[in-house]
Structure formats: C-alpha cells, structure tokens
Image: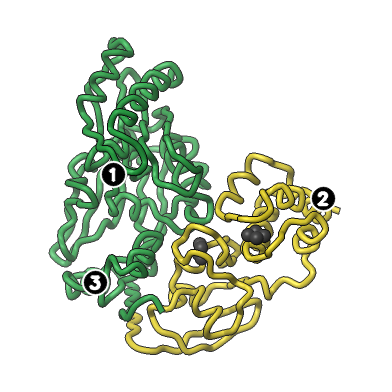
Amino acid sequence: MLYEFSYLAPRSVADLVQALDEHKDDGKFLAGGTDLLPNIRNGLMRPRFVIDGKKVPGADALNGGATEGLSMGPAVSINDLLRSPFVREQYPVLCVCAHELASHQIRNRATVAGNVVNASPCSDMAPALLCLGATALLRSAGGERELAFKDFFTGVKKTALKPGEYLERIVIPAASKGARGSYKKLKRIAGHDLGIVGVLMVRLGDSLRFAVSSAAPTPVLVESVTAKDSPEEAVAKVLAAVSPISDVRGTKEYREHMIGVYVRRLLAEVK
Amino acid sequence: MKDYAGPIELSLRINGETRRVQARPGDSLLRLLRERLGLTGTKCGCENGDCGACTVLVDGAPIKSCMALAVECEGSDILTIEGLRGHPVQKAFAVENGFQCGFCTPGMILNAVALLSAHPEEDEEADREWMQSNICRCTGYEGIRLALASARRSLKD
Ligand code: FES
Ligand code: FES
C-alpha cells in the first residue's frame, strides 16, 4: 500500500470543483500520477484525499479545427498529443517538446496539464506553451478565469493556481498555427533523468521566441531576440533572462555555456 | 461520485478474466497484482517509475504498474506476463538470449509485445525509443535487440 488516503473520482465538473473545494488543504488532484504517486510513496506528500480528474467527461478531449486553435483537457496524455495528426500538422512545436519528455511508457500516462501544473523548472511542455502564447483556463467552485502561461509559473514548483482550483483547459491560439521550432535538451541518460538545461526556439513569421528550461526557478520565456540580432546578441539576451544554479547535474557555468551553444545552433537550424 | 475510503472491493479484468479483489485506494496496480492476486510475474524493481520491471499492458498500452493506482484501472483490460503463453516474443527472447537473470524480462516482453503491434515493420529508431522505458542490468541489450528482430519476423509469417 502506498499510503492511507481516500480516492474520489468525480463524474462531473460540478462534483469535481466541489471535491476540490472541500479538500483544499488535504486533497491532491490526480492526473497521470507520474509525479504524484512517487511523491506519495516517498513520503513527500501526504494527501488524505486523492481526487482523480480523469473521469470527468471531456477531460481527455483534444479539440482543434480549421479556424480555432487547440484546446486540451487535463487528462490528455503526452502520447495523445504526439499521436494527433492535427497537432503534428498545425503545432509541430508541441510534438518537438513532447518527444523529449521522459520515456515512451511514462508518456502514456503523464499529461500535458500535469507537466505544467507541477511547475518544475525542467518541465518540457512549459517552453512550448510559453512560446506558442498558450492560456490556461482555471476553474474552482468560485467560477473560472483565464491566465496566460507567462503569468502562470511563480516559482520552483509554484503556480498561480489557488487552493481548490484546477487547470481545466489549455488553449493554444490559432495565431500560433504553423510555428516552427526545435528543442535542444541536455541530459545525462536518455529517458531516465531530468534535463540539465533545455532551449526551445520558435519562429512564427518574422518573430522569434526562446524558452529555457532548468535554468531559473521557473521555465523562462525570452521575447526580446529579433531577426536582426547577431548570434552573440541573441545569446546575451537569453542569458540575461535566466539565472541557472549549480547542482548535482551540472554547474552554473556549464549550463550558461550550453545555453549559448544551443542558441547558436538553433538560430542556424530553425529557418 | 465514486468515493472510496477504507478497504474496497474492486473488479478488474486481468488476462481476460474478471477478478474481484479486496484492495485499498492506496494500492498501486503493482502491489495489487503481486500481493493480493499472487501474480508475481510482474516484478518490483525500483517502485519509482525508473526501471520498467513492473510493466503491464492496460488497454494495450504499456505502463509502469508501480505508478498507477489499482482503482484507476477498473473497467480496463490488464495484461500481465501470466497472460502470455508461448507468445512469439517469449520464444524469441529464449532463442536469442534476450535475458540472463530474467528480472527485467516480464516487463521487457510486455513492452515488446506492445511495440511489435504498434510497429509491425522494422524500425530501429522506434525500437530504441520504445524500449528505453525498460532497464536491463545483465544482457547489454544486444540479445534483446536480436530477440525483437526475430519476433518481428515470426509474427509476420
Ligand atoms: S518498479 Fe515500476 S518502474 Fe521500477
Ligand atoms: S536479464 Fe537481468 S536485468 Fe535483464
């Protein structure tokens, strides 16, 4: 047994927000479980209620069309995303990042929403959502609100989600369709370790965006680089936006150096 | 709403059979299989999502059973190594020396079965990516690679 807790599986949005509201202090939202369950097992979290958000109708919906953007519920797994022909054609940047996330089996369970709600500095989906200008639809018993992902991450494993609130949908604007990009992630062992540093570059029309993971308390979006900048200027702007630390996976200097290497490579690669 | 406190009776479809079993909400699928149903073919390596020794197929998709709650799997079809009898992948692992100590083997075989149904055609890149979920401390992976190739051939004819 993992730990003594009760399991709630609401079948409607109304029941879900009520359960989250009742268990603001002692409940945890369960999506793919790839972070929550090891955390419970390792004693890092001790919820009294585990609230499974996957059984609400529509939780696994991944919708997109000719004129709309893309909208994803909290149960959409990383592999659901990778398998969607619509996503592959219209939002290839999402696939580029999803592909780098952990290993195939984990991607069958891990969700896009869970990856961003955990708000780990090394989240792989956050860079894509930041660069594509995605918004979060947050719901609680009090109602719903919308928040741009660039305002969503507030610190290491901290987000703007309030107690009792959950990420109901991730919405990617139609304007970001066709954005091209590439993600470079440095890691020690493929599929079995957290990233040391990651840089995503996205090009949409004339505008350039970079997002960096594992180099600051939150994933970082850099919008100041322009097509006219030299590679050196671009590297300087990206480095000015991050604040990497030294830890068991690498030193601050190594991370900064590799961010520079990746920014130069990406500028040459993403045309 | 389903509300499971204390011990509960779950009904799960395992290897084509419906099994009713006493469990607790906190039981992982892995613990339930091994400790409550005696299906010890599914191995417990790290219980942390890293090694893949606990791999089972849930509705055809390979997942790490240490990272899923048994209650979440109600209504799904679960396949464990006990559900395979003389499957071509098993034979290929034996013939090509796809294992030594055998601890990783049930997980490897189930992951390989799912791989070969998703990618029936030869695809080294897909194989490598897919099998990264499972770690083997013994074989150096060469025997496993050969076993995959030979199982693919025999599944085709
Ligand atoms: S025991 Fe589940 S991944 Fe190691
Ligand atoms: S055969 Fe021993 S771990 Fe793979």
Instruction: Measure the C-alpha gap from mark 3 to mark 2.
Output: 50 Å
Q: Residue at x 42, y 27 (%)?
A: A180
Q: Assign a secondary structure to mark 2.
A: helix
Q: Residue at x 45, y 74 (%)?
A: B28
Q: Is B95 on the left-hand or right-hand side of A219?
A: right
Pick out the residue farthest to the left: A142
Instruction: Measure the C-alpha gap from mark 1 to mark 3.
Output: 24 Å
Q: Closer to us: mark 1 or mark 3? A: 1
User: Looking at the picture, does residue A230 appear above or below residue B105?
Assistant: above
Instruction: Measure the C-alpha gap from mark 2 to mark 1.
Output: 44 Å
Q: Identify by letter the chain in green.
A: A
| Callouts 1 and 3 on one subunit | yes
Percent coordinates x, y for residue B113 in the rendering: 68, 59
Q: Assign a secondary structure to mark 1.
A: loop
Residue A34 at least partly seen: yes
Q: For mark 3, does the 10 Å Cα neighbourhood hold few (<14), some (14 to 19), or many (20 or more) residues?
A: many
Q: Amino acid at mark 3?
A: Gly
Q: Amino acid at mark 1?
A: Pro
Q: Closer to us: mark 2 or mark 1? A: 1
Percent coordinates x, y for residue A106 in the rendering: 48, 55
Percent coordinates x, y for residue B112 in the rendering: 67, 56
Q: Assign a secondary structure to mark 3.
A: strand
Query: Of B115 and A12, which appears nearest the observer?
Result: B115
Determine the colour of chain B: yellow
Q: Amino acid at mark 2?
A: Arg
On residue B153, the disc is 2
Q: For mark 1, does the 10 Å Cα neighbourhood hold few (<14), some (14 to 19), or many (20 or more) residues?
A: many
